[in-house]
Image (cartoon, grey):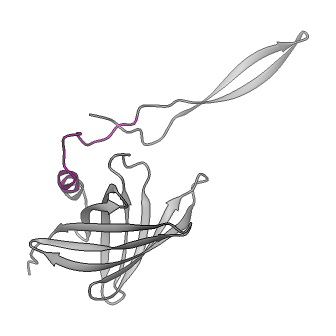
Amino acid sequence: MKVAAPLLPTVLARVRCCRRGSAVKVFLLILVSLPLVSVYSSAETLDDRVAYEQRNVDNEAVAAYGGKVGKLDAIFLIEWDGEPNNTLNGFYFYPSSGRELQYRLTGTNPKPGVLVLQEFTPTANGGEVLSATCRLTKRVSGDRIIWEGTMNNTDGHVLPISFSRKNQPTHF
């Protein structure tokens, strides 16, 4: 099993160097790199990983989906805000890379069966930048709800995007 470090610890070291008899203080920033660790076993399927994420969500309005961005497996956690605004928020990540890098999603469900999402990528300074707009349509196949469409990145790349989950009955 791999383990992912949520943050890389930094250490500030003070070193004395001598130059022509005078002591010069030099400060070095040392990044301690820990091996990446994942909560997933390499033998688990994407559906197993999605089920794990859904079990660990503490908000009933959040649904976990498994899917792909381009050719990479991805796990999406989406909160549906519902009526009257039909908005949603969430994020996705690549399980092969761990949860450290999460892409934030915001969007709308402007009409039944259609999603328009904006993807935001974290920046090095702790902010985020709009990196893509996604347009998806919904279909149902057997016991699965499937959203699929295209991701139009701000750099001009266009990728297929899809995510799905088992259709869960509504209990009133």
> Left of 1 or right of it: where is 90?
right
Whether residue 167 is visible here, answered yes or no, is: no
Image quarter for residue 148?
bottom left
Please tell me whether residue 4 is drawn above or below residue 19 in the rendered image. below
- Residue 118, position as x, y percentages in the image: 46, 73
Count of numbered circles on the image? 0
- Residue 3, position as x, y percentages in the image: 33, 36
Q: Quadrant of the N terminus?
A: top left
Q: Report if residue 46 lies within the magenta region.
A: yes
Q: Report if residue 75 lies within the magenta region.
A: no
> Left of 164 or right of it: where is 17?
right
Q: Quadrant of the C terminus?
A: bottom left
**Viewer-nearest residue: 137 or 63:** 137
Please tell me whether residue 138 is drawn above or below residue 129 in the rendered image. below
> Left of 28 or right of it: where is 160?
left
Whether residue 123 is visible here, answered yes or no, is: yes
- Residue 73, position as x, y percentages in the image: 31, 55
Image quarter for residue 37?
top left
Residue shown at 22%/51% (left/top)?
Answer: 49
Residue lying at the far top in this picture: please name it: 21
Q: Magenta residues?
A: 36-52
Residue shown at 25%/43% (left/top)?
Answer: 40
Image quarter for residue 163?
bottom left
- Residue 130, position as x, y percentages in the image: 54, 69
Residue shown at 38%/46% (left/top)?
Answer: 97
**Viewer-nearest residue: 64 or 136:** 136
